[in-house]
Image (cartoon, grey):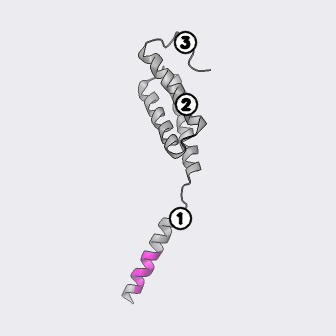
Amino acid sequence: MKYSKIIILLFLLLSNLLWANPTTDSLKIKRLKNHVSSLDYITRQIDNSKFYLNLNKSYCDSILSIDPANKFALDFKNRINLTLATCDQNINNKIELFS
């Protein structure tokens, strides 16, 4: 009797872990896209802070690790790299970064 209760408990725990509301890749990508968009807005408001640009770049890398051909993440990563390059060369106000 004792072992049957343990087996039932293990079965219930394992079934709950395996089948209870799994987060799919598309939901993860959607959540990461929201983070990227929010950080893009924050970055534009605080004069291209490198901290937020690098954080935004890491979110793009996370999207690309799930879906390597994601156009949204590739475009944003290129835009972030351009912004970081202009910050390094101190030409922030000489070219238009955001359209």
Q: Disc count in the image?
A: 3
Q: Amino acid at mark 3?
A: Ile
Q: Which residues are magenta?
A: 4-11
Residue tagged by mark 1?
Answer: 20
- Number of residues whose C-alpha sits closer than 10 Å to that of mark 2, classed few (under 14), some (14–19) or many (20 or more): some
- The local secondary structure at tag 1 comes to loop
Of tags 3 and 1, the one toward the viewer is: 3
Comes first in the chain, label 1 or label 2: 1
| Image-based side of 48 in relation to 2, left or right | right
Q: Which residue lies at the image location 51% right of the left edge and 11% below the top edge?
A: 93
User: How far apart are the two marked residues, 3 and 1, measured between alpha carbons?
Assistant: 50 Å
> In the drawing, what numbered circle is on residue 63?
none
Q: Which residue lies at the image location 58% right of the left edge and 39% below the top edge?
A: 70
Q: Residue lying furthest bottom in this view?
A: 1
Comes first in the chain, label 2 or label 3: 2
Q: Residue lying furthest top in this view?
A: 94
| Residue 46 visible within the image | no
| Residue 87 visible within the image | yes
Give how far across and how far down residue 43 sits, in percent. Answer: 50, 26
Give how far across and how far down residue 66 sits, in percent. Answer: 52, 46
| Image-based side of 53 in relation to 74, left or right | left
- The local secondary structure at tag 3 comes to loop
Give how far across and how far down residue 85 sits, in percent. Answer: 45, 19
> In the drawing, what numbered circle is on residue 95?
3
Q: Is residue 9 above or below residue 93?
A: below
In the rendered image, which quarter is residue 84 located in? top left
Residue tagged by mark 2?
Answer: 76
- The local secondary structure at tag 2 comes to helix
User: How far apart are the two marked residues, 1 and 2, measured between alpha carbons?
Assistant: 33 Å
Give how far across and how far down residue 67 sits, in percent. Answer: 55, 44
Please state, as top left, top right, bottom left or bottom right, where the N terminus lies in the image: bottom left
